């Protein structure tokens, strides 16, 4: 039976014990949970279980480094990255393995989490299935301008009955792949280029599509993710400089160095919200803006 390694990069995670219990308690196959404790020890402590492995860092090195370290310490044929504030579906591991080719990165359907009650948050909004890769120059006066995985509600409505489907980009709180694809398709994550935290799935998704793999959404299973906001605060600290570095590198790399791959990706999912109708002009404009 192929093992799934669930890796969790953690920094000051209030709900980490709950998440670890989800990983171990709701798996139906061979699973291990590898937690990278980034410069802290959890309080309350994590549950004792032979399937739990801890990687402890004396000082915080950031989420990307934590993901890399946890995967290096893992042994499964499949790798699943999960944020430390998530609830899972029963049998998530077997359901994800059942629909994952060697060169796929798969994202389960995402629900919102009411972490205090530890239930799916029912606020009238539908689950999140699809994301598009945003055009980085749609509004240059917006500080959030860049390449992000934005929720794609129109595509969700049009393709609601397709259970395993192509996904252009994603949000990054959970993804699943084979160790083979991690090793030859996109990993380890590049800290020197992207920085410690931001643009995680834009690196993963763009590299996967650009290197001959595919990104999929799997609506046969789900996870619930907590959007922390001001109430729960951020675990990983992100400096303004590190944030800007990641966004700037992403735009330059994918609009200049790998422009052909990005154009091909946009064309595959065309029409994509926010992208200009004339893609040739859009990439020529990017070269002019970026000095390429």
Image (cartoon, helix red, strand yellow):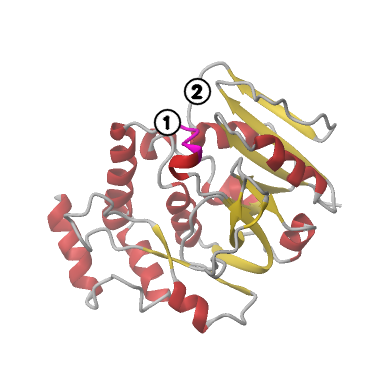
* Camera-side residue of 238 and 216: 238
The main secondary structure of the magenta stretch is loop
What is the span of residues highlighted in magenta in the rendered image?
232-237
Q: Could you say whether the residue bearing mark 1 is in a helix, strand or loop?
A: loop
Instruction: For the residues labelled 1 and 2, say whether their Cβ atoms are less than 8 Å apart.
Output: yes
Q: Could you say whether the residue bearing mark 2 is in a helix, strand or loop?
A: loop
- Residue 271's place in the image compared with 198, above or below, is below
**Left or right: where 212 falls relative to 51:** left
**Left or right: where 151 falls relative to 9:** left
Image label count? 2
Residue extending farthest to the top is 58
Identity of the residue drawn at 60% across and 53% down: 113
Give the percent coordinates (x, y) of residue 82. 62, 46
Crowding around mark 2 (Cα neighbors within 10 Å: few <14, some 14 to 19, many 20+) is some
**What residue sits right under mark 1 in the picture?**
237
Give the percent coordinates (x, y) of residue 101. 67, 63
Which of label 1 and label 2 is nearer to you? 1
**What residue sits right under mark 2 in the picture?**
60
Identity of the residue drawn at 17% across and 51% down: 290
Q: Is residue 179 visible?
A: no
């Amino acid at each position: 039976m192929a093992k799934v390694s669930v890796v969790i990069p953690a920094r000051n995670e209030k709900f980490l014990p709950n998440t670890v219990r989800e990983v171990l308690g709701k798996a139906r196959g061979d699973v291990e949970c590898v937690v990278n404790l980034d410069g802290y020890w959890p309080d309350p402590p994590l549950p004792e279980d032979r399937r739990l492995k801890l990687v402890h860092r004396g000082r915080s090195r950031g989420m990307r480094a934590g993901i890399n370290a946890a995967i290096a310490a893992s042994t499964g044929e499949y790798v699943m990255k999960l944020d430390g504030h998530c609830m899972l579906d029963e049998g998530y591991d077997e359901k994800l393995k059942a629909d994952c080719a060697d060169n796929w990165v798969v994202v389960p359907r995402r629900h919102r989490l009411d972490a205090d009650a530890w239930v799916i948050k029912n606020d009238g909004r539908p689950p999140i299935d699809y994301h598009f890769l945003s055009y980085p120059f749609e509004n240059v006066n917006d500080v959030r301008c860049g390449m992000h995985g934005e929720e794609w509600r129109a595509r969700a409505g049009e393709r609601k009955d397709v259970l395993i489907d192509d996904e252009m980009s994603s949000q990054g709180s959970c993804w699943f792949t084979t160790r083979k694809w991690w090793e030859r398709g996109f990993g380890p994550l590049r800290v020197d280029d992207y920085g410690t935290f931001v643009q995680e799935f834009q690196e993963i998704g763009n590299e996967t599509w650009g290197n001959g793999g595919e990104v999929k959404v799997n609506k046969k299973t789900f996870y619930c993710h907590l959007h922390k906001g001001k109430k729960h605060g951020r675990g990983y600290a992100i400096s303004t400089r590190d944030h800007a570095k990641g966004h700037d590198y992403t735009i330059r790399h994918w609009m200049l160095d790998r422009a052909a791959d990005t154009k091909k990706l946009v064309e595959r999912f065309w029409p994509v919200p926010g992208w200009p109708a004339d893609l040739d002009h859009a990439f020529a404009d990017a070269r002019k803006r970026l000095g390429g």
